[in-house]
Amino acid sequence: MAAALALAERGRGRTAPNPNVGCVIVRDGRVIGRGWTQPGGRPHAEAMALAKTGAAARGATVYTTLEPCVHVSSRGPACADLLITAGVTRVVVALVDPDVRTDGSGIARLQAAGIDVATDMLAGAARRSMGGFLTRQKLGRPFVTLKLALSADGAVAMASGTSKWITGPEARAHAHLERARHEAILVGRGTMEADVPTLDVRLPGLQDRAPQRIVLSTSRHPGESGGIPAMEAERAPLADPSFRWGDGGAAWGSIARPADIATLAGVDHLLVEGGAQTAASFLHDDLVDRMLFYRASILIGGGRTLPDIGLTDLAAAHGRWSLHDTRRFGSDRLDIYERTRS
Amino acid sequence: MAAALALAERGRGRTAPNPNVGCVIVRDGRVIGRGWTQPGGRPHAEAMALAKTGAAARGATVYTTLEPCVHVSSRGPACADLLITAGVTRVVVALVDPDVRTDGSGIARLQAAGIDVATDMLAGAARRSMGGFLTRQKLGRPFVTLKLALSADGAVAMASGTSKWITGPEARAHAHLERARHEAILVGRGTMEADVPTLDVRLPGLQDRAPQRIVLSTSRHPGESGGIPAMEAERAPLADPSFRWGDGGAAWGSIARPADIATLAGVDHLLVEGGAQTAASFLHDDLVDRMLFYRASILIGGGRTLPDIGLTDLAAAHGRWSLHDTRRFGSDRLDIYERTRS
């Protein structure tokens, strides 16, 4: 199942509105088929893996990160039916599909055909792996990752606004890799105008993975209390729903308020890249699920830091985030925090 | 030698102006004596270890974190002579003593007596272990550790000043343990007046290890540029030179400027505990050797952060600090940074 989860990562940021699933087929202790959801969401992982095995799947065990689907689409048959036809004898599922079209009926159909089914293997990791799909199902919006590059004292820029560079080349390369795992990247209008960011993926072999670019078209009104930006009256056009992988991010989409991310078509993973005011807007509205804090071993002092996020009581700040993982990149470190939701 | 270095830690913060040394004596593959510098600086580690071995030291190997001394004091004989008299055959030294009264002559005396001497074993760890003594020798001031408790976004307090509590009980207990490893703790006048900190060691069995308390008697003048406090004209009395362990920190000492730490008698390890303005003053003057950043997995947003430290160029911020170690305390993490000095 761990191998299936690793395969699932290959589809992340490219399969919306479908989940990024991974599948491994094993017979006699040997892996005979591997598959993952293809860009655009089809073919599904199970279909890809079965295409590799051919007739060898008879009697095999299938590990899949999500319950096989039962709905027939114009783009392909139901995976549960494919598995029954292939004659597999056992299916191990990490997570039951919350999609109302499946939601246990995939497992039921497999069992009705005499296939042995086990569930909940590495379910937590599968939930993390398919966060985009699950957040869309549960909260009706993309899974939002906030990325910030910070000094050890928490500054995202000097007081002058200078932020090139806080982190080193290894950390910045990793941040580019993260871009390739998201359907869209969002920045604030200030960042767009000041930095004219390309927001592309500058990594060999991944240049065509540049996500859709979106700007939060808000402006901050002087004297406003709390530091949260006022929203512009006019509504900017939504992110281009006709966007497809390979377009190279030619156009910018825009939204007027953080909550408008729910309307972004084809975006299940959104990377919010800054600046600090935009980050605060999303945090204020509790629209961040994961934070990537790239911390440099430098001190800035008196720099720009995260503005007000609406916290009124220090006790209320606790219990909302957990430090999930930490990685080192040269002299920098990446801290990955996850929102704890019940 | 690693065992000797661990023993040396027992003396840290209690041996000034002497170094905190550790010593292990081994014969026939068995440890027959262990010693460390006693509170007040005497007896030395080698004398303590030899007191354990008695005649068994004949033919033994001695591991000591610092070159044995050759100077006879009213408080005891020279350790090199003690080792020669004991009849040890080999002495392994981590670090040659930079004290002009020794500086290689301890090794020379041992060798003249026919003892085999090796040096530079775990020298880096020994340098870290005796940072207080070595900083006093080299820079004429205590080794300064800056401790801050921070949110994930770098705030040391809410905008209102509230900072109880950012970190959890495990992290705070560790911070108390760090207090016991310093001869003195310093806070700014604002922290002293606002928080009335006891600055004691609230850990079972270590209550009598409360270090001397010192206040930085500076004030910040409104409208002053840069955020570095102006210094008061009058000079406050120096930290009490008659302070001894066990006094329980009854009196407060004070200094007027960060650079005045050089005048603190009997203090080779100084812990600067805050607030943010005091931290910035020490960093501005490049008087910090080590930083303990206790980071909570919380966001504050718009909180109080480290003020200006005189940085004018982002490139100049790099290369000054290295992340030496990281530890977890509950949901918090301690990041230990060390000043990189050539």
Image: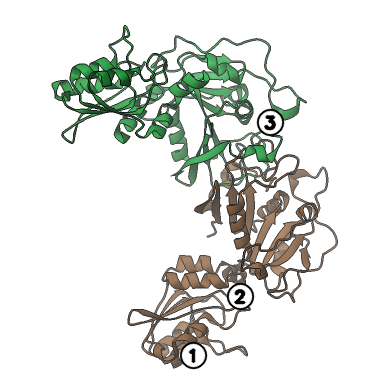
Chain colours: A green, B brown
Looking at the picture, how far across and down is residue B259, in whole percent? 71, 62
The chain letter under disc 2 is B
Looking at the picture, how far across and down is residue B6, in whole percent? 48, 69
Which of pointers 1 and 3 indicates the residue nearer the eye? 3
Q: How many angstroms separate mark 1 from mark 2 (CA)?
A: 22 Å
Is residue A220 shown left or right of residue B33?
right
Q: What element carries label 1?
A: helix
Say what amino acid the circle numbered 3 marks: Gly
Mark 1, residue position: B81
Q: Is residue A218 above or below residue A203?
A: above
Q: Say which mark, if any, is on residue B15.
A: 2
Is residue A109 shown left or right of residue B50?
left
Mark 3, residue position: A310
The chain letter under disc 3 is A
Which of pointers 3 and 2 indicates the residue nearer the eye? 3
Residue drawn at (75%, 76%) of the image: B242
